[in-house]
Amino acid sequence: MPVRLPKELQSFVLDHLAGDREALWNLCLAGNRDLFTAALPRTWQDVSFTVRFSQLPNFQKRFSQFTSNTDRAQAVRRLQLTLAGEFDKDAFTDAVADELPKLVNATHACVVCFEPCMRTTRARRGLLRL
């Protein structure tokens, strides 16, 4: 028979495991409904996506599916988007603009670029020289 821990002790254990996603998933699979209910939202606190420009439409679909679950979207505290390769910043902004407001409890967001990642149009380059 599983041991039922007091909520305060469960919270202490989950706070201690906050950075260890694998341990949190193991708690979700432990068979204890209380632990599952408390641990599952914490597995979504730190979220990261890696995107190449050629995969932008697929990323937009995946990100939209991720944020369509309100419980999961509200659990996110930190979001990291890693861009690999050259990107059109307008296309990237359009891909995430409608979904970011759904992450109502996010306190940190980070965009990481590998290689030169933001490309500008000729018209914008001309404006930048002025």
Image (cartoon, rainbow, N blue to C red):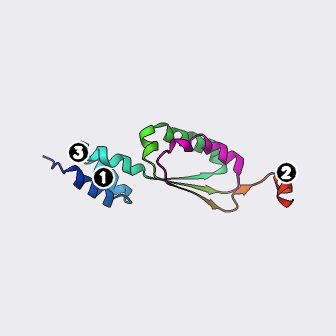
Task: State how many labels appear.
Answer: 3
The residue at 39%/51% (across/down) is: 43
Boundaries of the magenta span: 86-107
**Which residue sits furthest bottom?**
115
In the figure, is residue 110 to the left or right of 33? right
In the figure, is residue 35 to the left or right of 117? left
User: Mark 3 belongs to which amino acid?
Assistant: Asn
Residue highlighted by disc 3: 32
Instruction: Give coordinates of residue 122: x percent, y percent.
Output: 84, 52
In the rendered view, would you say 56 is above or below 109? above
Counting other residues with Cα less than 10 Å from the Cα at mark 2, is it few (<14), some (14-19), or many (20 or more)? few
SS at circle 1: helix
Labels 3, 2: front one: 2
Question: Which label belongs to residue 11?
Answer: none
Residue highlighted by disc 2: 123
User: Mark 2 belongs to which amino acid?
Assistant: Ala
Q: N-terminal of the two: label 3 or label 1?
A: 1
For the residues labelled 3 and 2, the Cα–Cα distance comes to 59 Å
**Which residue sits furthest left?**
1
Labels 2, 1: front one: 2
Instruction: Give coordinates of residue 52: x percent, y percent.
Output: 63, 52
Instruction: Give coordinates of residue 105: x percent, y percent.
Output: 46, 48
SS at circle 3: loop
Residue highlighted by disc 1: 26
Q: Give yes or no for residue 96 being in the magenta stretch.
A: yes
The residue at 63%/62% (across/down) is: 114
CB atoms of marks 2 and 1 within 8 Å: no
- In the depicted view, which residue is nearer to us: 107 or 73? 107
User: Mark 1 belongs to which amino acid?
Assistant: Asn
CB atoms of marks 3 and 1 within 8 Å: no
Q: N-terminal of the two: label 3 or label 2?
A: 3
Instruction: Give coordinates of residue 19: x percent, y percent.
Output: 39, 60
